[in-house]
Image (cartoon, coloured by chain):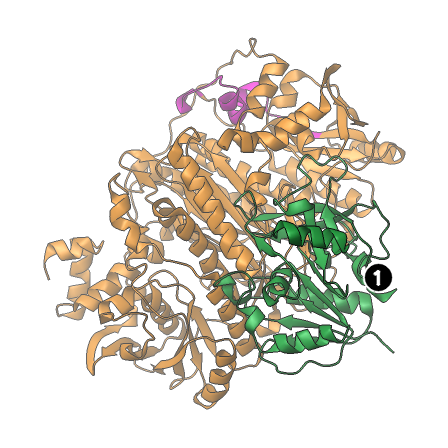
């Protein structure tokens, strides 16, 4: 059975095209692009909620998208145990729908941040199982609200239940602080309890081709496929 | 109509008389508004037209030259590259965030209006002395505005320039450039083809923002103007533009559009007049049909510069299909008029004709001035004394000057990797993106050396273009064409007019020599506040291509022990203007020596050499030499822990160059490169090697991490 996947496009999504290429180039399977007003989702193995500024970030990043038609189908998809990956704005949408815990607030610098960042895996799951412990990945970030925040109990819970997938770390020769945006515990990505939903701020779909500054983004899809 | 009203509209009484004599009647207030919008400098180039005509605008790769929304060049296999640069200087001084954001929005519309999908933006921004709070406020606002708009709509910013000089204290400059990819058989133009075609309005509703924006952009500021002019600044909504872009591109790819024109400066007036003029037709528009945000008079509707709006001509039968597509994208859409055969522009409101003018008089009879200009005086040459400057001191002067430091504080606020096709991000010699599903790399850079141009506008302009040329060559991108943004002070001053005339002449000369035609551009005059003019700042954006991205050269060091080879001729202490200014040897413009004549033949020969050797994979990495000389060029090449050790005469380390490059060459290829250089008779010097954790100049060892820290961090330290 070949691997099938889909990317949801909201008005204002701007990484949907990149995410489609990422899936086509790395899964070799069928890839669907689904408009947010659709009320049904084809049966696929993986859904990506892409980055961007869905609905112009009106109200809060991800808030409007979390109420759009397709979201019920996305929830059903995830409840069926299949994979759901939210990247950047997609991560924000996942916290707004309540599928993931916590919230993403404005960066500590109060500025948009677009650069390469370094992350490593914290706890093992299906999205990062092909990555070694302590292996440092170089992947770009581009966000204004990427600062992961939650209350202390939730933070303890994420830690105790091993739901933290990625954390920011220092790269070799990097001049900057490991924690680029002020996230609690350097959190760059978390999963749900079932570990089939991952939200992450870095953009793996911008780090997989030969001409990209790094190809580390491949490892997420490779882990899922493995 | 009284004189005061005419002058308030930015027309001279003579100009008004020409109109009256032609029409043989008085004008309505709406018609006066139209002439105010169309006959100002920003829209009709009345001062610069005579000189702009001299620019080379065509060769075999040019598909569209100046005169459309953007220029387009051919990069083979039906792929075209559309690009243009445009200024938003005045609005960005009055309201930096919205002024610069809408500058980006406007230039992106120019690109997708032609059916091209934007693939990159660049910017060229200039500010006054950083010690003033005002400059800091402008810098923060402008960078945030550019970032906000481009990041939201999702187009990568791949490069640009950011300069500080006190001549911009009261007039900062914001020039935004955009690049798009189009299939050459699916380009859209603004010229309507069918009489009876429907004129449709697509995009945001019209509001009061930006009324008289274009005439504001053609005016000298006085210091108390700022608050008064703020309502003339448009407010941008990148989310709406994203929807508009996707909606328009979908309409165009579905074959539902006949022609399209964006509503930029002077809104519905200039877009409809330009359409009529290009098609040699008339237009009949009912202003009551225009979607409004608030109640507006016909006069206000005509002059509003509300953002994210398009005018298009469609076939009657396609109306319903278009409605359906635009409903999906939640975009306002309304039929507001039709194309006629009258060659007149007619606007009606409440069943009354408010404007009825022949297109000819608005466009063809627009004033064209041959303003008086004076040539700069001959300069005397002298020797400057720099004996008190130690190497340490020279380094410290550069490392504490914003113009030399890494600008990641600026570009980390921009998304440079969205769309997933970015090959070279800002901070390298040029930005490079790949055209999706091809191997083609498109490179671009923006440049200007205002100090050179102040000293000698003609030669200075040639140096500016050559610097942009080297930026592209250093990445092995073949330079192909130019877009220009001529920012100057008031042309009513014959000295300033002289700068305009001579720099255009220099641009013309060098563009012909390099075979890089000018395919689009923009003029921004009156950048002065009272008697404080800006430095002449004719910015150019240069675009090029390498059909195989794998042949690009890196601009950073790759491996230890690579040989460092210096190409080009040092201009020497006495003829390096930025060196003299920034090492504080010279303080007044009148003291500089005449610029040395640029060695164009050497530039071309050297470029050819680099392209040929890069294609044979003989070069590891390279960088061009510009402001800050060999020193800054090497500084920019450092990567991770790879530094350098060099031996070279002190003067030649810090001065500027003609045809200057640093090549890093693998030891195994060193002999071959040297043989080839000798064969081509290109002067070179082997100056040292790439060395790990080393920063060594003439046996003087500096602390590597300390230098790197300064270069990458001092910008933020100085402005915060």
Residue B524: % across, % down: 38, 48
- Look at mark 1 in the image and give the residue it sits on: A222
Q: Which residues are magenta?
A: B567-591
- Which chain is depicted green? A
Colour chosen for chain B? orange
The location of residue B355, given as percent across then percent down, is 22, 73
B720 relative position to B600: left or right:
left
Q: Which element type, helix, strand or loop, lies under badge 1?
A: helix
Relative placement, left or right, of B159 versus B133 is: right
* Nearer the observer, A132 or A218: A132
* Residue appearing at x 70%, y 50% in the figure: A156
Q: Quick check: A43 above or below B13?
A: below
Residue B260 in view (yes/no): yes
Q: Is residue B220 left or right of residue A218?
A: left
Q: Residues within 10 Å of mark 1 (few under 14, many from 20)?
A: some
Residue at 34% from the left image edge and 37% from the top image edge:
B170
The quarter holding residue B498 reads: top left
Inspect the magenta stretch and tell me whether residue B584 lies in it.
yes
């Amino acid at each position: 059975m070949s691997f099938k996947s889909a990317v949801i496009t909201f008005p204002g999504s701007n990484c949907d095209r990149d995410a489609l290429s990422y899936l086509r180039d790395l899964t070799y399977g069928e890839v669907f692009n689904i408009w947010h007003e659709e009320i049904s989702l084809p049966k696929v193995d993986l859904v990506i909620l892409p980055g961007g500024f869905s609905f112009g970030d009106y109200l809060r990043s991800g808030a409007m998208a979390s109420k759009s038609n397709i979201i019920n189908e996305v929830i059903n998809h995830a409840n069926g145990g299949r994979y759901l990956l939210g990247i950047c704005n997609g991560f924000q949408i996942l916290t707004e729908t309540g599928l993931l815990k916590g919230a993403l607030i404005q960066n500590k610098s109060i500025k948009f941040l677009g650069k390469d960042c370094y992350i490593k895996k914290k706890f093992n799951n299906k999205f990062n199982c092909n990555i070694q412990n302590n292996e440092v990945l170089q992947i770009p970030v581009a966000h204004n609200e990427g600062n992961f925040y939650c209350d202390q109990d939730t933070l303890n819970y994420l830690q105790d239940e091993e739901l933290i997938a990625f954390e920011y770390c220092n790269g070799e020769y990097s001049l900057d602080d490991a924690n680029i945006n002020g996230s609690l515990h350097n959190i760059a990505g978390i999963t749900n309890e079932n570990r089939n939903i991952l939200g992450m701020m870095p953009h793996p779909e911008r780090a997989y081709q030969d001409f990209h500054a790094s190809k580390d983004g491949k490892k997420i899809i490779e882990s899922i496929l493995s | 109509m009284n004189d005061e009203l005419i002058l308030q509209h930015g027309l001279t009484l003579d100009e008004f008389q020409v109109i009256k004599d032609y029409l043989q009647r008085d004008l309505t207030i709406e018609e006066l508004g139209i002439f105010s919008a169309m006959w100002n400098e920003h829209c009709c180039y009345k001062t610069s037209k005579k000189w702009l005509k001299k620019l080379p605008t065509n060769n075999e790769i040019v598909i569209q030259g100046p005169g459309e929304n953007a220029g387009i060049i051919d990069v083979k296999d039906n792929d075209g590259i559309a690009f243009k640069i445009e200024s938003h200087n005045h609005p960005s001084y009055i309201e930096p965030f919205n002024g610069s954001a809408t500058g980006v929005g406007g230039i992106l519309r120019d690109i997708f209006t032609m059916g091209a999908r934007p693939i990159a933006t660049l910017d060229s921004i200039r500010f006054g002395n950083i010690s003033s709070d005002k400059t800091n406020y402008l810098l923060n606002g402008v960078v945030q505005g550019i970032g906000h708009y481009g990041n939201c709509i999702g187009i990568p910013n791949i490069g640009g320039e950011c300069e500080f000089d006190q001549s911009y204290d009261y007039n900062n400059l914001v020039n935004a450039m955009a690049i798009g990819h189009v299939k050459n058989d699916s380009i859209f133009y603004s010229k309507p083809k069918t009489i009876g075609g429907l004129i449709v309005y697509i995009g945001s509703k019209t509001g009061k923002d930006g009324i008289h924006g274009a005439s504001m952009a053609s005016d000298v500021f006085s210091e108390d103007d700022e608050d008064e002019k703020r309502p003339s600044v448009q407010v941008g909504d990148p989310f709406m533009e994203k929807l508009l872009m996707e909606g328009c591109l979908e309409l165009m790819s579905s074959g539902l559009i006949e022609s399209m024109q964006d509503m930029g400066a002077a809104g519905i007036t200039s877009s409809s007049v330009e359409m009529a003029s290009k098609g040699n037709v008339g237009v009949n528009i009912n202003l009551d049909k225009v979607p409004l945000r608030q109640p507006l008079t016909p006069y206000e509707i005509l002059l509003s510069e509300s953002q994210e709006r398009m005018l298009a001509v469609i076939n009657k039968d396609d109306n319903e299909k278009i409605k359906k597509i635009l409903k999906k994208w939640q975009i306002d859409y309304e039929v507001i008029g039709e194309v006629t055969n009258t060659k007149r522009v007619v606007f009606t409101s409440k069943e009354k004709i408010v404007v009825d003018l022949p297109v000819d008089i608005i466009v063809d009879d627009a004033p064209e001035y041959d303003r008086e200009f004076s040539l700069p005086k001959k300069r005397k040459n002298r020797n400057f004394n720099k004996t008190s400057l130690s190497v340490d001191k020279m380094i410290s002067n550069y490392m504490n000057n914003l113009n030399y430091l890494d600008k990641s504080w600026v570009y980390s606020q921009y998304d440079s990797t969205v769309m997933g096709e970015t090959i070279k991000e800002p901070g390298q010699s040029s930005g490079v993106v790949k055209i999706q599903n091809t191997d083609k790399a498109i490179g671009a850079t923006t440049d200007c050396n205002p100090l050179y141009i102040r000293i000698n506008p003609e030669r200075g302009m040639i140096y500016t273009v050559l610097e942009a040329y080297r930026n592209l060559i250093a990445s092995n991108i073949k330079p192909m064409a130019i877009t220009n943004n001529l920012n100057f002070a008031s042309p009513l001053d014959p000295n300033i007019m002289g700068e305009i005339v001579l720099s255009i002449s220099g641009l013309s000369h060098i563009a012909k020599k390099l075979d890089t035609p000018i395919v689009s551009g923009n003029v921004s005059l009156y950048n002065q506040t009272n008697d404080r003019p800006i430095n002449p700042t004719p910015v150019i954006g240069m675009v090029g291509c390498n059909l195989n991205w794998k042949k690009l050269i890196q601009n950073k060091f790759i491996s230890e022990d690579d040989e460092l080879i210096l190409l080009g001729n040092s201009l020497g202490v006495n003829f390096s203007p930025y060196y003299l200014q920034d090492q504080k040897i010279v303080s007044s413009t009148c003291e500089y020596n005449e610029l040395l004549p640029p060695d164009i033949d050497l530039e071309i020969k050297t470029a050819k050499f680099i392209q040929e050797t890069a294609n044979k994979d003989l070069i590891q990495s390279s960088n061009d030499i510009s402001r800050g000389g060999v020193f800054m060029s090497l500084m920019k090449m450092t990567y991770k822990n790879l530094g350098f050790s060099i031996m070279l005469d002190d003067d030649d380390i810090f001065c500027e160059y003609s045809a200057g490059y640093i090549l890093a060459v693998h030891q195994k290829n060193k002999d071959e490169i040297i043989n080839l250089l000798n064969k081509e008779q290109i002067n070179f010097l082997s100056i040292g090697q790439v060395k790990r954790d080393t920063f060594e100049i003439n046996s003087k060892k500096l602390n590597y991490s300390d230098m790197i820290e300064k270069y990458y961090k001092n910008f933020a330290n100085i402005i915060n």
